[in-house]
Amino acid sequence: MIKAGITCVQISGIFLLLMLAVMARADLTIEVTRGVDNPTKIAVVPFRRSGSLALEDMAAIVTADLNRSGQFDVLSRDAMYSSPSHANQVHYRDWRALGVEYLLIGSSDGTEQSTHLQFELFDVYRQKSLLKGTYADRSHAERAIAHKVSDAVYKKLTGIEGAFSTRMLYVSVVRLANKQQTHRLMIADADGARAREVLKSSEPILSPAWSPDGKQIAYVSFETTRPAIYSQVLATGVREQLTNYRGLNSAPAWSPDGKRMAMVLSKDGNPEIYIMELASRQLHRVTHHSAIDTEPSWMPDGKSLVFTSDRGGKPQIYQVAVARASSAPGDAAAGPVKRLTFKGNYNARASLLADGKSMVMIHRDQTGYHIAWQELKTGRLIILTHSSLDESPSIAPNGSMLLYATKYKGRGTLAAVSLDGGIKFRLPSPSSDVREPAWSPAM
Amino acid sequence: MKIKLMSVSAVAFKKGIFIAVLAGFLGACASSDQKDDSAFDSDADDATAVATGIDDSAPIETIDEPAMDLDTVFYFDFDQSTLSASTRAGLDAQAAALRGNDSDIRIEGHADERGSREYNLALGERRAKSVADYLAIQGISRSRIEVVSYGEERPISLRSDESAYSQNRRVELK
């Protein structure tokens, strides 16, 4: 959780533009552009509200979550005949008449000390309760609680862990009248709400990444007028500059165990992949090639990296095994470099799914740059997005969807697509160009 | 932006490198940059000195800018870092001016928006380095040259069409 008082830090006399975490001027809003053909019909009855605090409409948050998944068709409130908040008020026949398969009801209580929600999910056709629970949190925690309810309902009805309680990082850029730009690293709920500023700079910020425990982030900032990699503890805002080498310092990627970071440095002449042991700051070089080697991404077992290289003339995805963690200096490559992509002449920015069997990446065809999915064993490739400037794919921790950046009506926009390509939504931002989404691990 | 280097010993060191690099290029060798880079990288204090040497309040135009009437922006083809004939001519003029003074030069590489941001960062560096290599061959000491890539992060034009892309694929001398 971000706390209100992120502190300013000064490193080596460099003036930093770390600001207090403030609410963004405008949250992102959701537009579902495509869903599954036969979505599950569910009704989410407005939760009864009591207590001394006026609570946010948690049923509306759950409704938005389920609609955004593309797998549910949530009944409009106007169509409801009744508003039950307790099991003995539920008349299945009424809901069946509306074509509803499942029904979610609840009652909430808000005080200065805490927020409570009791909820129950019913199967309308079988006329039985499927799930019942209570969530309690500090006061003003309606969004956190509502997302937990969405996670529980989603898991019960699909068998897959929900990802509604997760968050995302993204970069927002505003161009000022004098052609200067204001760059902000933002953190928001996965639905775009509760956006807060993590870092603000007049110089570019890029490649935000999460630690596997979700407590720290890393990014590249040009605030010294050169690129450098920083890590930052989200709760306190305390940050460290991890690299300051001549040339590129970029593409940070935490290892699955959180102890190492893959990165790109060009200090030895041209961009190469390195691994840094975070405890000792010991660097191990992974690649040795005069071409561009960049965008390292870990296999989930931590035993190899995939990366982008143009060593074959055009950017393609390669894989290399890496040695176990070591505090001694030396090379980290533990095997030959193997090419993974052969379709098309531009494949870049790969990231692996949790099972390590497939990856998503940027793929160019004759209509532009798209997000594509590729199975590693067979090489089978499926193009998931069809706009022409799609980039920065970032997979949800439950593997159901990915966020990516695209251009829509001339402006940088975040969008999401399911891994089967069937569900799509956009998160347009009214006031700025947004880009480089990074979906958090499960929280 | 100018970068002021550093201590007296560092200046002496720079001159040593300058001679070494010149000697290297007499043999038409273009790979002595690695030696140069590692000489600076090996000392963490140097890196800090470079970083703190950039001060927005310092007068930027105290040095007679050789670039005033010369081309300072050079353009590149898609996914390419090769120098066109007109770019080489412009850089010849820059090199002539730079030989007449001892000012430092910052070479900024840029890419268009297509494709991945990190790959574009690397591509911008490759473009800036091909300019740096050309200037070095013209006898400009590598210790005077700093290469920084912004990738696609600082476009000239925000539009998404071919003319915008061709303006954005560039190297700027500062």
Image (tube, rainbow, N blue to C red):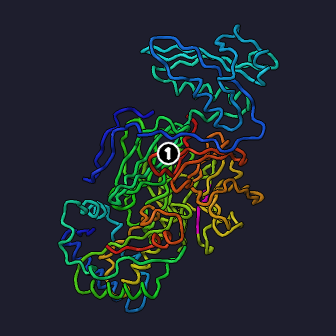
Magenta region includes residue A307: yes
Q: Secondary structure at mark 1?
A: loop
Is residue B58 magenta-colored?
A: no
Residue A397 percent coordinates (x, y): 61, 41
Tell me if residue A213 can be seen: no
Which corner quadrant of the image does residue A161 belong to?
Answer: top right
Residue A76's place in the image compared with A86, above or below, is below
In the rendered structure, the answer to whether residue A322 lies left or right of residue A179 reads right
Q: Position of residue B136 (x, y in %)?
A: 36, 83
The residue stretch that appears in magenta: A304-309
Mark 1 crowdedness (10 Å alpha carbons): few <14, some 14-19, many ≥20: some
The residue closer to the viewer here, A51 or A336, is A51
Q: Is residue A433 visible?
A: yes
- Camera-nearest residue between A69 and A313: A69
Identify which residue is drawn at 55% across, 59% down. A295
On the image, numbered disc 1 is attached to which residue? A429
